[in-house]
Image: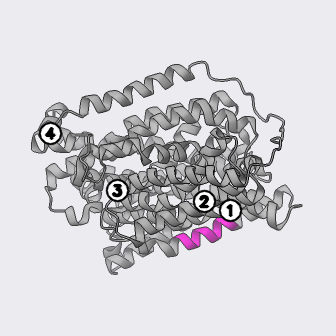
């Protein structure tokens, strides 16, 4: 009962706080609903970015990966800091200067309207097919494990998971549908503090217990139990070979942090360029620290449980929570988990609604739609996508290499073709619109065939790198036969102050150095 009360209390507090902060805000304009009225500060942006990114697919999936494979999976996190440096110094100034609301808007300015529409539809489909179902399902695993929902209602475990998926989906939808981006960002910030506190409690209490009151002694015992788990340099046949850091992972990280609507939309909503850069670089700091919450617990789980859960690696984190957290904290942590799920779920819904309303509905269906109509369409889109995500969630169960690995493999279907086009648009002025569309469909077909149809013994992240190179070659060839038509980008009135943050380069340098040091210091443990 204490667990339930703590859970309900914290969840209700977050909802009340978000309502209180937004009670005077106007949500009937597209800027107000989709971009938080362009009023977000650096701290709010960083908190929202982190919580949009870190959800139960990380708490469950990443800890499951590290439990089985060790610290080599840290690459997903710490290399994000490098991509955030590029996003802060290069991408976000360009986006804000162009007055963008969505990433596909840029593609129309650079290529043409058809490219914009195709990418918009690709993105909306990718949200429903990949991220949303896995977020819902991993959240359900955690909450089902903590509250034993199937036992409480006297149903099978699979039915208990299904009931939890539906409940999370409905609650998450309400935030996105009625509150817009600012409600999402404000609730994310509160939940972000909860995640940092609750997430840190798990490894800290575990290490205190293992070390008989001494955290350093606890770390020493966990290390001595399996020193190979602390190595960050992945072997060629591992789940995360070191070589992928220099091939497809580079492209993926640049896309995710600099061109992904769900993430970068928070920076689009900044008060000014200074706050946008602060938000991105603060997120970089958090991404370097976050492995303590989403990687270390998995390795601690190996100390406690050995390889007994290797066949069910995604259950290691709930098992660890039950083992180390006092009963009084379990309800609070369940609320934090719920917040992490809602954060990613409602953020993705809001981004999908933004893209569909601005890039598809207003352009192709109703060019004369007013602001209120666009907000209504955004809410309707969120509702429909939420239903699809809830229905799709059970189909991601029992991923052979874990849910996080499955998520990344599925993301590659859409991320790499779009990243190829975006990067070509930024840096190669001669690439034409026809070439961009050719690369989009070629990349999609190449990855689907090499990853899911034919058995090719190449790591899927290396396939990302190969696909990117092939996309570039194809765009050069097509552009030679169908050259770009000359035109001038539309000039827009600046919507925010474009003065850069004076410490942006200093903090960027620190993030680069720290990332390199992590690999130097933890790369010699074998």
User: Which numbered disc covers residue 223?
Assistant: 4
Q: Quadrant of the C terminus?
A: top left
The residue depicted at 35 percent of the width and 42 percent of the height is 75
Task: Name the residue beneath numbered marker 2.
Answer: 440
Q: Nearer the viewer, residue 373 or 354?
A: 354
Q: Which residues are magenta?
A: 381-389
Q: Earlier in the sequence, mark 2 or mark 4?
A: 4
Q: Residues within 10 Å of mark 4 (few under 14, many from 20)?
A: some
Whether residue 385 appears in magenta in the rendering, the answer is yes
User: In x, y percent, where is residue 167?
Assistant: 49, 69
Front tag of 1 and 2: 2
CB under 8 Å between discs 1 and 2:
yes
Task: Name the residue beneath numbered marker 3.
Answer: 459
Whether residue 247 appears in magenta in the rendering, the answer is no
Front tag of 1 and 4: 1
The answer to whether 250 appears left or right of 378 in the picture is left
- What main secondary structure does the magenta stretch of the protein show? helix
Front tag of 4 and 3: 3
CB under 8 Å between discs 4 and 3:
no
Task: Name the residue beneath numbered marker 1.
Answer: 118
Residue sitting at the far front: 481
Mark 1–mark 2 Cα distance, whole angstroms, equals 9 Å
Position of 237 relative to 448 (above/below): above
Q: Residues within 10 Å of mark 1 (few under 14, many from 20)?
A: some
């Amino acid at each position: 009962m204490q667990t339930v009360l703590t859970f309900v209390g914290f969840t209700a507090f977050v909802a009340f706080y978000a309502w209180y902060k937004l009670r005077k805000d106007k949500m009937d304009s597209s800027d107000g609903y989709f971009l938080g009225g362009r009023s977000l500060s650096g701290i709010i942006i960083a908190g929202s970015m982190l919580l949009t990114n870190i959800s139960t697919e990380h708490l469950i999936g990443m800890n499951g990966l590290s439990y089985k494979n060790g610290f080599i999976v840290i690459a997903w996190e710490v290399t994000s800091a490098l991509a955030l440096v590029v996003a802060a110094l290069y991408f976000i100034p360009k986006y804000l200067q162009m007055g963008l609301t969505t990433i596909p808007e840029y593609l129309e300015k650079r290529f043409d309207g058809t490219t914009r529409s195709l990418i918009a539809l690709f993105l909306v489909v990718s949200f429903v097919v990949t991220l949303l179902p896995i977020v819902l399902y991993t959240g359900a695993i955690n909450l089902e494990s903590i509250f034993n929902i199937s036992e409480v209602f006297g149903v099978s475990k699979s039915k208990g998971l299904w009931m939890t998926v539906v409940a999370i989906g409905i609650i998450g939808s309400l935030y996105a549908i009625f509150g817009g981006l600012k409600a999402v960002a404000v609730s994310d910030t509160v939940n972000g503090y909860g995640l940092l506190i609750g997430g840190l409690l798990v490894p800290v209490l575990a290490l205190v217990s293992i070390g008989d009151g001494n955290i350093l002694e606890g770390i020493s015992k966990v290390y001595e139990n399996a020193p190979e788990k602390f190595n960050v340099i992945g072997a060629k046949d591992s789940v995360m070979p070191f070589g992928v850091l220099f091939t497809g992972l580079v492209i993926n990280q640049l896309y995710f942090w600099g061109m992904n609507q769900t993430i970068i939309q928070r920076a689009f909503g900044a008060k000014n360029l200074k706050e946008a850069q602060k938000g991105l670089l603060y997120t970089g700091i958090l991404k370097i620290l976050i492995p303590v919450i989403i990687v270390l617990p998995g390795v601690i789980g190996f100390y406690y449980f050995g390889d007994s859960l290797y066949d069910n690696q995604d259950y290691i984190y709930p098992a660890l929570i039950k083992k180390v957290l006092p009963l009084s904290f379990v309800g609070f942590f369940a609320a934090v988990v719920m917040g992490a799920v809602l954060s990613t779920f409602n953020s993705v819904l809001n981004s999908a609604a933004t893209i569909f309303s601005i890039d598809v509905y207003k352009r192709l269906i109703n060019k004369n739609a007013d602001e209120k109509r666009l907000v209504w369409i955004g809410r309707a889109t969120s509702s429909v996508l939420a239903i699809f995500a809830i229905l799709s969630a059970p189909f991601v169960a029992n991923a052979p290499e874990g849910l996080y690995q499955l998520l990344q493999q599925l993301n590659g279907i859409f991320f790499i073709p779009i990243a190829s086009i975006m990067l070509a648009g930024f840096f190669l002025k001669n690439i034409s619109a026809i070439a961009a569309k050719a690369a989009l469909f070629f990349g999609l077909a190449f990855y689907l065939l090499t990853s899911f149809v034919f058995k090719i013994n190449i790591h899927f992240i290396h396939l990302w790198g190969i696909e990117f190179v092939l996309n570039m070659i194809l765009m050069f060839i097509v552009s030679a036969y169908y050259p770009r038509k000359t035109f001038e980008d539309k000039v827009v009135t600046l919507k925010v102050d474009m003065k850069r943050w004076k410490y942006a380069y200093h903090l960027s340098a620190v993030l680069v150095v720290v990332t390199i040091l992590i690999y130097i210091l933890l790369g010699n443990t074998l």
